[in-house]
Image (tube, helix red, strand yellow):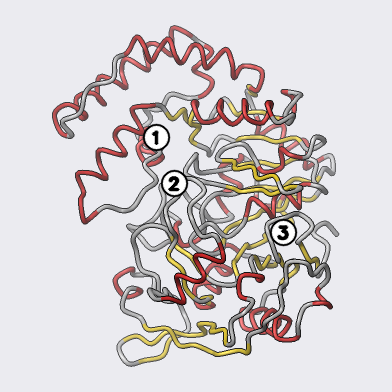
Amino acid sequence: MAGIIVVGAQWGDEGKGKVVDVFSAHADLVVRYQGGANAGHTLVVNGVKTVLHLVPSGILHAKTMCMIAAGVVLDLEEVIKEIRDLKEAGVLTNPEQLKISDQCTALLSYHRKIDAAREAKAGLEKIGTTGRGIGPAYEDRASRKAILFGDLFDRERLRAKLEASLDEKNFMLTHYYKQEPVEVEPLYQRMLEMAAELEPYRSRDTSLLIHRALKSGKKVLFEGAQGTMLDLLHGTYPFVTSSSTLSGSACVGSGIGPSLMQKIVGITKAYTTRVGSGPFPTELDNELGDRLRREGGEFGATTGRPRRCGWLDLVALKYAIRVNGITSLALMKLDVLSGHERIDVCTAYRLDGQEIKELPVNSSDLSRVEPVYKSLAGWSDDLRNVRSIQDLPQAARDLIQFVASEVATPIDVVSVGPGREQTLWIKPLFS
């Protein structure tokens, strides 16, 4: 068996979509296990860009089966849009290629409405969510009031659960947020329409299908959303997402035991980015940061928001390696660093006059640290046409070696551009 988890090792936007797309050429099954449409995975194949929010990134490989597991909050409107766009592009011609768990939490219009109203009311204290309704949908699941994907196919149960949910949500919308209420009947009818369109992709038990695939020796990739530092329990709380983004969530969200997992691949950029509020020790709020944003195309695939940019933070990366049990790394966007005379890498923090090499778990402490940098030589070569590690300039290879040595974790793959062909392998994924 070969169960491989792909996890973001920074604040999200590391390039997981490209990695999973490239890895999927060798996989039988790709499973999306948590998060929702707040994720934005951008794939570039033969110059054509595809942005996915819910459908797993393996969908562009016709022989690879894809699943959306129970841990995902499923925005029904968004997944329908993605499926339609894929079919229009000549992809997903066989509905058997995509299966959606009956146990997914259905994310509906009122979740988005509450999310937006909450952020607006928070003012300067807002978290910086995408406004996609992810938090309110997970809240419904935790309070045992969620409408599940499987409920769409039982009209009586769906109607009863929707009425009960809106009774509470409309009270909150009208009395606390001063918003217009959501009417039951139009939403109910729309949900019936969506159910009919999504029924070909329904799976009553994805956990069982994944388990059988692993036991029969199939190669299975588990694709996460966001990044380690946005984890609900172990991220920079409260500036985090609403689900667990760690590798352990792949087991929980998919319904698979950890003994069936073989490798955990952490995805990191050669620099660091963050969207929204919260501490960011290596942030470059200057022309250098603007340059990284511009040359790296650092704008959110989901929201279009500009990302905050900074140098690579090895203290945070080592933390991600520890809490995820990462066995190897994929280093993304190395090409963006071309043209820099000097490249800084954060190897420690200074907090209250003392140098520390472990990440403070308290966000207020993390917001006060000063990064301690190691400067490495840069390079002027354009890396986008490089097709082997050996052809990289020496300074680029030195950077790769330095990072791997500092974090005591091998770097098995390096990306020098958004295309599949711009992927340099140091060690094969499936051994």
What amino acid is found at the position of numbered circle 3 in the picture?
Answer: Lys
Give the residue pinned by disc 1. 137
Give the residue pinned by disc 3. 263
For marks 2 and 3 on the same chain, the one whose residue lies earlier in the sequence = 3
For marks 1 and 3 on the same chain, the one whose residue lies earlier in the sequence = 1
Give the residue pinned by disc 2. 303
Where the C terminus falls, by quadrant?
A: bottom right
Percent coordinates x, y for residue 318 in the rendering: 55, 74
Q: Secondary structure at mark 3?
A: strand
In the rendered image of this protein, does residue 143 appear above or below residue 315?
above
Nearer to us in this view, 158 or 116: 116
For marks 1 and 2 on the same chain, the one whose residue lies earlier in the sequence = 1
Find the distance from the CA under tag 2 to the CA under tag 3: 31 Å
Q: Is residue 1 left or right of residue 258?
A: right
Tell me whether circle 1 and circle 2 mark residues in contact (CB < 8 Å): no
Q: Secondary structure at mark 1?
A: helix
Q: Residue furthest top?
A: 156
